[in-house]
Image (spheres, helix red, strand yellow):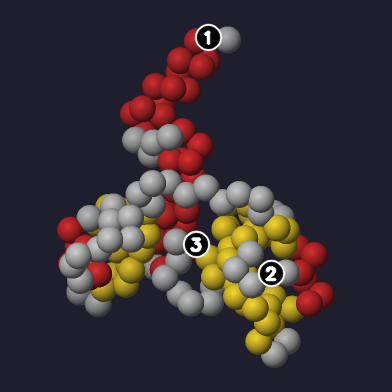
Amino acid sequence: MNIGGKYNWKHAERDQLIYLGKKGSWHQFKKIGDPREVWCEVLDEDLHMIEETKDIPMPRWPHRYKYLSSMGYVVWRDVFEGDMRCALDDAVKEHKVAVFVCESEASNYCDYRNAMTMKHGTDDVSKIAGKETDELQAR
């Protein structure tokens, strides 16, 4: 494993991970799109369940989430491309897409929206449904 390397679970390719290194007995990973510094820790004997990812595409404006005490877990669209010129909390409120009570629901929603964008080039349901209808009619 290489620090900074890109990995994923063999059974869950959408969980895109960055290897942070080993701390004690644990190999630590950060999940792309998740605000936590360490998303999971894996023992040596369980590394066989993780594989190196050749390419981790991310949408141009990925969905992310952040906890705001006044709102809950807010999913927001990161349109700043690394050049944010306002406070993060202000950006989250301005570009919010959805709000969840549970962190796992916010994380899953971000994963879903980002996966749809990578697969279809958009996460606009009406456009995705239109593409799939056109593909079925062409058969």
The mark lying in front, picked from 1 and 3, is 3
Label 3 packing within 10 angstroms: few (<14), some (14-19), many (20+)? some
Q: Is residue 132 left or right of residue 80?
A: right
Note whether 28 is above or below 135 in the view shown: below
Whether residue 78 is visible to the viewer of this picture, yes or no, is no
Which of marks 2 and 1 precedes in the sequence? 2
Q: Position of residue 88 (x, y in %)?
A: 25, 69
* Label 2 – label 3 distance at C-alpha: 16 Å
Q: Amino acid at mark 3?
A: Ile
Q: Is residue 48 left or right of residue 60?
A: right
The residue singled out by tag 3 in the image is 32
Mark number for residue 64? none
Quarter of the image that includes the C terminus: top right
- Secondary structure beneath dot 2 equals loop
Quarter of the image that includes the N terminus: bottom right
- Secondary structure beneath dot 1 equals helix
Q: Quadrant of residue 5?
A: bottom right
* Label 1 – label 2 distance at C-alpha: 45 Å
The residue singled out by tag 2 in the image is 2
Residue furthest top in the image: 138
The residue singled out by tag 1 in the image is 138
